[in-house]
Amino acid sequence: MAKVPSVKGSVFGGVVEEFRKLLAGGEVTREQAGRWLRPADLELIDAPIAVAAWYDVGAFVRLNELLRDVVGDGSNEYLRERGRESARRLLEGGLYSQLEYLQRTEVARVTDSRARHEAFGRDIRRLTTISGSIYNFATWTPAKDRDHALRYLVELTDAAPFADPLCWRAEGFMNHMATQHGDPDLWLWRRLTRDVVRFDMVRDL
């Protein structure tokens, strides 16, 4: 039986919580939510969310689209901010030890540009290992950018289920990481093919 592309409850729970607040505040009704969500999505939302469980990534995408359109006035900047918030939430909650990177990055300890580049590469490799803890599909691969000696890129393969709203969230997540060592708005994403997404640094470190 094929594995259903899924997201971990530790991340899924954040959007469910936000959607429940919309319902409680009357900003959207269950009937209106049907414009974005499927009946099975609402069943998930009605049940307790277990942080260690896996949830259909399709439901996660649809919830993000609903929240972007209702709360974020249709702006993808809303999704970027949700990605930043996910980074903060996971770090503060101590759920992923790899995210200690954000507080003790090697880059902060070196000043030479090439040494910073090498240290940043080691830190990026550590950070991308959390992808398998959050999503049960696709592969994240950091590499040196052949066109820019002091930059890296991160390529996501088998990425068809990684819909555009998740790319915006991931961009925000990665840029929150970069902000921790003084490099805000360092990453931009683009979809190369249906199955390949790439995150590029927009400048040298």
Image: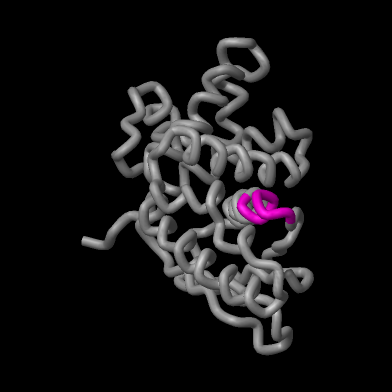
Q: Is residue 199 magenta?
A: no
Q: As displayed, is residue 77 above or below residue 178? A: above
Q: Is residue 13 above or below residue 79?
A: above
**Residue 171 picture location, percent across and down:** 65, 55
14 left or right of 94?
A: right
Rendered residue at 64%/19% (across/down): 28
Q: Is residue 146 above or below residue 187?
A: below
Image point (40%, 46%), residue name: 96
Quadrant (top left/top right/bottom left/bottom right) for the N terminus: bottom left
Looking at the rendering, the stretch of residues picked out in magenta corresponds to 177-182
Question: Could you say which is closer to the camera, residue 65 or residue 87?
Answer: 87
Decide whether residue 181 is among the magenta residues: yes
Q: Residue at x 70, y 85 (%)?
A: 149
Q: Name the residue rendered at 64%, 33% in the picture.
A: 67
**Count of numbered badges drawn on the protein:** 0
Residue 138 x %, y %: 42, 66
Q: Is residue 17 visible?
A: yes
Q: Is residue 84 left or right of residue 128?
A: right
- The answer to which quarter of the image holds residue 13 is top left
